[in-house]
Image (cartoon, grey):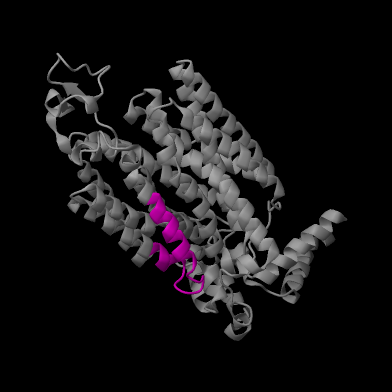
Amino acid sequence: MVDSLAPLLTAHLEADEDSSSPLTFDKILEQSLSDFGFSQFLQIVLVGLALTFDAQQIFITVFTDAYPTWHCLDHTICNPATTDICKIPRSAWEWDGGFKGKSVISEFDLECSSSFRRSLPSSTFYVGSIVGGVVLALIPDGSLGRKQLLFFSSFAMSLTGISIFLSSNIWIYSFLKFVIGFARSQTGTYALVLISERVSTKLRPRATMIPFTLFVLGFMSLSGIAYLVQHASWKILYLCTSVPAGIHSIFIYFFALESPRWLHLEGKNEEAIEVLKRISPANKSYLESVSSRLPPKETLDQTSSYSIKDLFIRKWAFQRVTLVMIIMFGLGMSYYGVPLAVRDIKVNIYLSEALNAMVELPTFVVTPILLEKFSRRSSVLVNCLIGGASGVLCFLMSLYGRTKIAFALELGSFFCARIGFNLMAVYMVELFPTCVRNSATMMLRQALVVGGACCPLIASLGRNIPSLSFAVFGFAMSGLGLFALLLPETKGSSLCDTMEEQEQRDQALKTSQSC
């Protein structure tokens, strides 16, 4: 009889302990979202699809701005294998298929232009991403909310992509690419933060891999769409990717749910509880019983006035931002640069880009394993070193004409760059509290974009020195990845909401480690 009453007695004591201890919103969220339900999965997919269309806009220039093939019309002065078309009359050669609008290069007569002018659209895209990231990072976290920012970003990107159909010269096209880069500069940040703040600590590593998987599917689908419209104008590819993106942004506006953490921090406890009920209907009764015990808005207002300046005036925050930006810069060079430089290895462009996209899929299985089994710092460090070494070896193998081995090493380098990005995405969310998480993550992703902005120019060097860009990307990833040793470990920690809460937890961790 005593044994049978023991579980009931234990449960009763735990309940008394829970009722006597202060109730925080973090405890409510962790309890209500402890299970991964179908409603939660649908919300993650809905938000994560924004990364699908973002991926298409990032890599679309691989196809639209590619150097098209050509053939000779006058074989007495022309040989496709050895002749430089810039040194023979225009009447002596023609683009394959006789269609000038197949590529930006052919339509705007850039075949004999400088590397700078040919790479201008890609560069302005990344410059737009940098400028947009800086401007949008100045928007306080408490202004519009995660959902609204994601909607405006996605809708503006798709609308500008459709407008490219009207571009008539390289300058208009480059300007529109700048606007697209500006609009989508923080799409990934908004989606990642929104998803991370709607799942429990236990499920965060796996939940954040879902939008990244959708990102890869966007990359892969782009290869298929480009192949289907390869004989049409390059502008058709923009329409095929931008119109669905616009439709998706409307779905976000009407059906996506706001971040409960952000709502709570803004003092909107009732709305936050309603969101949790919709995400986790099975815990509706629990949420109703605890909703009245949350602190009122007046209490929250005393601690919720934060802005991006807090990332600079607080030493620990500034140090974290600086270190992560350095690491992300190296990863950005490899992640965005390797797919651009792969055309220097003399492989089929459609096959190579499809394989690069497929290589990303296993990373979403490997990343959660690394996050659950190993520390954040060691995972990032070892991954960057392996990826960097693969890039350097790819350059060496290409010099010796080992095309197949070089391509395999290229895939390996890209694989590590993707894993590094996945690891840092989760790491970044855990390093900063809710009150500045959006602004902090925006700044850190800016470093990724800055690294990507250097890629078109570096990749264009491969036309003169075969595959040299792979060595540059490899050294950047491995060398800058060493800075991970200076970051604090965050494995197993829950998300903090305020700067003071983050500082208290960090101090507690230092005290426990010293003991």
Front position in the image: 211 or 160:
160
Percent of width and height locating residue 19: 72, 75
- Is 147 inside the magenta-drawn segment? yes
Residue, far top: 76
Q: Is residue 286 visible?
A: yes
Residue depicted at 52% across the width and 51% down the height: 447
Query: Looking at this view, is 269 or 35 the one in front?
Result: 269
* Rendered residue at 67%/67% (across/down): 314
Q: Which corner quadrant holds the C terminus? A: bottom right
Of residues 163 and 200, the one drawn nearer to the viewer in this rendering: 163
Q: Magenta includes 393?
A: no
Task: Indicate the position of residue 498 as horizontal and vertical percent values.
Answer: 64, 70
Q: Residue furthest bottom?
A: 298
| Position of residue 507 in the picture relative to residue 149 (left or right) | right
Q: Find residue 343 and report its horizontal and vertical position in percent.
A: 37, 29
Examine the rendered structure and indicate whether residue 463 appears above or below residue 157: above
Magenta stretch: dominant secondary structure: helix
Q: Residue 442: x percent and y percent? A: 51, 59
| The residue positioned farthest toward the right in the image shown | 515
Q: Residue at x 46, y 57 (%)?
A: 191
Q: Quadrant of the N terminus?
A: bottom right
Residue 494, picture quadrant: bottom right
Highlighted magenta segment, given as a residue range: 125-151
Indicate whether 83 appears above or below 317: above
